[in-house]
């Protein structure tokens, strides 16, 4: 990694840059485009979605969106936080930015008192399962829709 990346809030100043983040065409089935994630952040109750641009120097290298304290089962019995979306730009993959993004969300959840970080992913050989397992997530055995659920102890 050339220098230390950082997270930036998505603002009017960097919105177009955020929207220009693109994963590889063969990965588009694995994650929604940034515009869709920002639209979801807009329609969810304030504070649930935590969207951030991943920036290294003057380059926007990716986008992440965490979910914070969501009602996981929609019946008030289970609250969870984790990584909702992660899009590392096609030209910037394999440089540690995905690992940085996971660590940054883990730090934010920990800062809020959380002890577990959740993620779900598109299953199959073209999905990011091995990336998450490499970073220490373990499969909980649950599924969310048709996606496996992973958990990282913080
Ligand atoms: C999956 C993704 C986030 C990984 O980001 P990245 O910046 O390329 O990953 P990093 O460079 O931080 O890699 C961290 C480690 O995971 C490994 N890794 C990365 N992608 C991997 C994959 N698909 N399978 C297995 N290992 C992988 C790297 O080799 C590295 O291991 P090392 O540090 O031991 O050498 C990125 O490829 C991406 O945006 N994919 C498309 C969208 C997607 O699937 N998002 C997840 C939605 S749930």
Image (cartoon, helix red, strand yellow):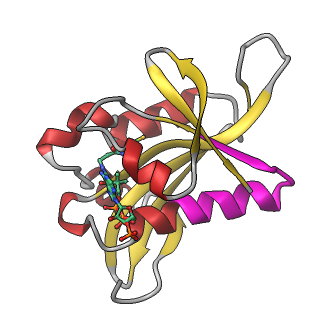
Q: Residue at x 46, y 65 (%)?
A: 99
Q: Is residue 117 left or right of residue 42?
A: right
User: In the rendered image, which quarter is residue 76 located in?
Assistant: top right
Q: Is residue 111 above or below residue 146?
A: below
Q: Would residue 103 be counted in the magenta stretch?
A: yes
Is residue 40 inside the magenta stretch? no
Question: Seen from this angle, which residue lies furthest bottom?
Answer: 3
Which one is nearer the viewer's eye here, 45 or 151? 151
Identify which residue is drawn at 87% across, 54% down.
113
Left or right: residue 44 versus residue 74 is: left
Q: Quadrant of the N terminus?
A: bottom left
Quarter of the image holding residue 29?
top left
Magenta region: 102-118
Q: Is residue 76 left or right of residue 22?
A: right
Q: Quadrant of residue 129?
A: top left
Determine the residue located farthest toward the left in the rendered image: 25
In percent of width and height, residue 71 lies at: 75, 23
Tell me the quadrant of the picture where the C terminus can be found.
bottom right
- Residue depicted at 36% across the width and 29% down the height: 123
Q: Position of residue 91 (x, y in %)?
A: 18, 65
**Residue at figure coordinates x 79%, y 30% from the top left:** 79
| Quarter holding ligand 1 | bottom left
Q: Please tell me which residue lies in front, 36 or 149.
A: 149
Can you give x and y, in whole percent of width and height, for residue 144 in the image? 54, 19
Q: Is residue 105 left or right of residue 146?
A: right
Instruction: Give the x, y percent position of residue 37.
Output: 43, 37
């Amino acid at each position: 990694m050339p220098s230390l990346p950082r997270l930036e809030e998505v603002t009017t100043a960097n919105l177009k840059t955020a929207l220009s983040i693109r994963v590889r065409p063969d990965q588009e089935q694995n994650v929604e485009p940034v515009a869709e994630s920002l639209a979801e952040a807009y329609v969810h109750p304030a504070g649930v979605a935590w969207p951030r641009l991943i920036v290294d120097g003057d380059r926007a290298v990716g986008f992440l969106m965490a979910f914070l304290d969501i009602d996981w089962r929609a019946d008030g019995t289970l609250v969870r936080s984790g990584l909702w979306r992660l899009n590392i730009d096609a030209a910037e993959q394999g440089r540690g930015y995905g690992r940085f993004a996971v660590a940054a969300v883990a730090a934010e959840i920990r800062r809020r008192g959380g002890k577990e970080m959740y993620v779900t992913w598109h299953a199959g050989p073209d999905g990011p399962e091995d990336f998450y397992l490499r970073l220490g997530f373990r499969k909980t055995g649950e599924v969310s829709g048709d996606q496996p659920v992973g958990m990282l102890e913080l």
